[in-house]
Image (cartoon, rainbow, N blue to C red):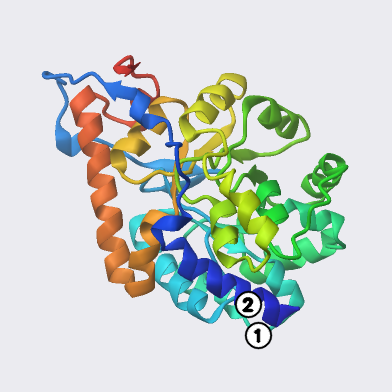
Amino acid sequence: MSDKIHKRKSEHIALSLKEEALGEGITNGFDLYRFQHNALPEIDFEAIDISSTFFDQHLRTPFLISSMTGGAEMAEKINRNLAIAAEQQGWVFALGSTRVMLESEKFRQSFQVREYAPNTPIIANLGAVQLNYGVTVDQVKQIVEWTDANALVLHLNTIQEVIQSGGDTNFSNLLPKIENLIQSLAVPVGVKEVGFGIDGKTAKRLIDIGASFIDVAGAGGTSWSQVEKLRSKEKFKKQAAEAFASWGNSTAVCLEEVSGIMPEKNIIASGGIRNGLHAAKAIALGADYVGFARSILKEAVDSAENVIEWMQVRELELQMVMFGVGAVNLTALQSTDRLYKR
């Protein structure tokens, strides 16, 4: 089983870099919004503060490396580069799905990055559906211990699992299992999608059972139906996946809905976020943190230095937007009246 998962993880890395892995006919939704430029912001650019906190831990930025990989040979290098960069730049680091850690010790090390990021908030990640396939609370606690994680995120990936060969598709009666896990862990537990978006109603159900954060992970970036289509050897599934190239709730729409029902909760915006301008729009729509995944993957394959340089550009872009609208800190950006819908 572990070799099969390792092969899948390796294929996911390679295929995620291809343009064919992107959704078609849908955007992240931020193209519908524009900032009104403030020609006289009355602030000093050098005074702009993009610092944040993650469950009381101070951060230099509101940025997050979204869950991508682990459990493959190449993943160890990628995660090491990401961890080094996250530590230097003050980003949160969310690991890829850690299920393989339970299957084999072989690639467990690819998730164990604490030595490279001693002060970085690390989020462990597991498919929520695995709670229906024998993964126990004690095993999840073991994952948190192995990764020395500060939090756990459960991912929801229904459409991906259907198209994936041998996918786990029994999502019945998951909510009470998620609630039990939340009550049993000592770290905060959140929930994310994988690129099809969490709407307001779903977020409310999750918050009501105690979820500490929601990552909307909307459409507009990598489409996992398309990634699995590229992997699949099953003719019917490949054909069916074509109809889902534009499936999902755009990230901007998800943010509008989720921020409206949980203004005091931790909201992560991810899904097709490509630059600091997208990030600024997400924050102005109610996000507390903004996650990048595919757009940072190529640099992560290369080196930590390339990742750091890429991160610095995104940070500068966010600061420039804030200067352009007269927001001296993230609180001011969240409450700006200079974001309007076209």
Q: Of all residues shown, which one is farthest toward the bottom?
A: 106
Q: Is residue 123 above or below residue 325?
A: below
Q: Which mark is residue 6?
A: 2
Q: Which quarter of the rendered picture does the C terminus lie within? A: top left
Q: Quadrant of residue 317?
A: top left
Q: Is residue 279 above or below residue 67?
A: above
Tell me residue 127's x, y (percent): 71, 56
Looking at the rendering, in which quadrant would you find the N terminus?
Answer: bottom right
What residue would you read off at disc 1?
A: 106
Residue type, mark 2 in image = His
Q: Residue 315: give x, y in percent of width and height.
A: 28, 46
- Characterize the local packing of mark 2: few (<14), some (14-19) or many (20 or more) Cα atoms within 10 angstroms: many
Question: In the rendered structure, are the residues bearing label 2 and label 1 in contact, judged by CB atoms less than 8 Å apart?
Answer: yes
Give the farthest residue toward the left.
Answer: 39
Instruction: Report the Cα–Cα distance between label 2 and label 1.
Output: 10 Å
Residue 83, placed above or below residue 1:
above
Q: Given the image, on which type of amino acid does mark 1 rest?
A: Lys
Please give left or right for residue 221 compared with residue 233 in the image.
Answer: left
